[in-house]
């Protein structure tokens, strides 16, 4: 069981930035990811990173060029730097983990371990 604790959410105006953090258990050979969800919609993949080779990162189309996922293995923390935020980025952001490689299609159903979530609200 991987423990995942998110923080860093909040309210920001459009065009602003936020950095989310997710403290994890010490893990190897896992895909760590960020997903987001708004009420009434499916959980959407934002970004993923593979623990054993951080060159393997994948992003959802709607965040490419604006969001960056990174990991500090010493601190067992994965970050999501969010720049140029838009109102449509509003949602509950969840950290997730799954044993094995990451894949480019960021499917929430592939992940079995989830954090409690942190709310991000972007106002226009």
Image (cartoon, rainbow, N blue to C red):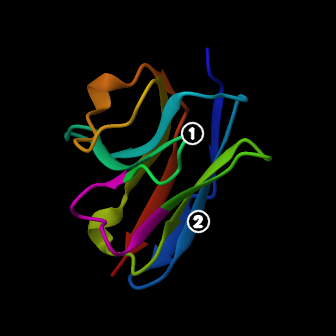
Q: Residue at x 44, y 24 (%)?
A: 100
Residue on which disc 2 sits: 19
Which residue is rendered at x = 62% and y = 22% of the image?
A: 2
The residue to which callout 1 is attached is 51
Magenta span main SS? loop
**Distance of label 2 from label 1 (alpha carbons):** 19 Å
Q: Along the horizontal axis of the image, is 121 left or right of 40?
A: right
Question: Going from the N terminus, do you reach mark 2 or mark 1 first?
Answer: 2
Q: Residue at x 38, y 25 (%)?
A: 111
Highlighted range, magenta: 58-68
Query: Does the segment drawn in magenta span residue 98?
Result: no
Residue 51 spot, x, y in % from top left: 57, 39
Figure check: 18 above or below 70: below
Task: Classify residue 123 by image quadrant.
Answer: bottom left
Q: Secondary structure at mark 1?
A: loop
Evaluate whether residue 38 shows in this view.
no
Foreground of the two, 49 or 115:
49
Disc 2 to disc 1: CB gap under 8 Å: no
The secondary element bearing badge 2 is classed as strand
Counting other residues with Cα less than 10 Å from the Cα at mark 2, is it few (<14), some (14-19), or many (20 or more)? some
Q: In this picture, is 69 found above or below 108?
A: below
Q: Quadrant of the N terminus?
A: top right
């Amino acid at each position: 069981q991987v423990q995942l604790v998110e923080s860093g959410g909040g309210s920001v105006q459009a065009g602003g930035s936020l950095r989310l953090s997710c403290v994890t258990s010490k893990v190897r050979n896992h895909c760590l990811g960020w997903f987001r969800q708004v009420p009434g919609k499916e959980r959407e993949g934002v970004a993923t990173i593979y623990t054993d080779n951080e060159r393997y990162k994948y992003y959802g189309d709607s965040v490419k060029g604006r969001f960056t996922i990174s990991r500090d293995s010493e601190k067992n923390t994965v970050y999501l730097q969010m720049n140029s935020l838009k109102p449509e980025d509003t949602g509950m952001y969840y950290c997730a983990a799954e044993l094995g490689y990451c894949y480019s299609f960021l499917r929430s159903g592939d992940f079995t371990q989830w954090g409690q979530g942190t709310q991000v609200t972007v106002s226009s």
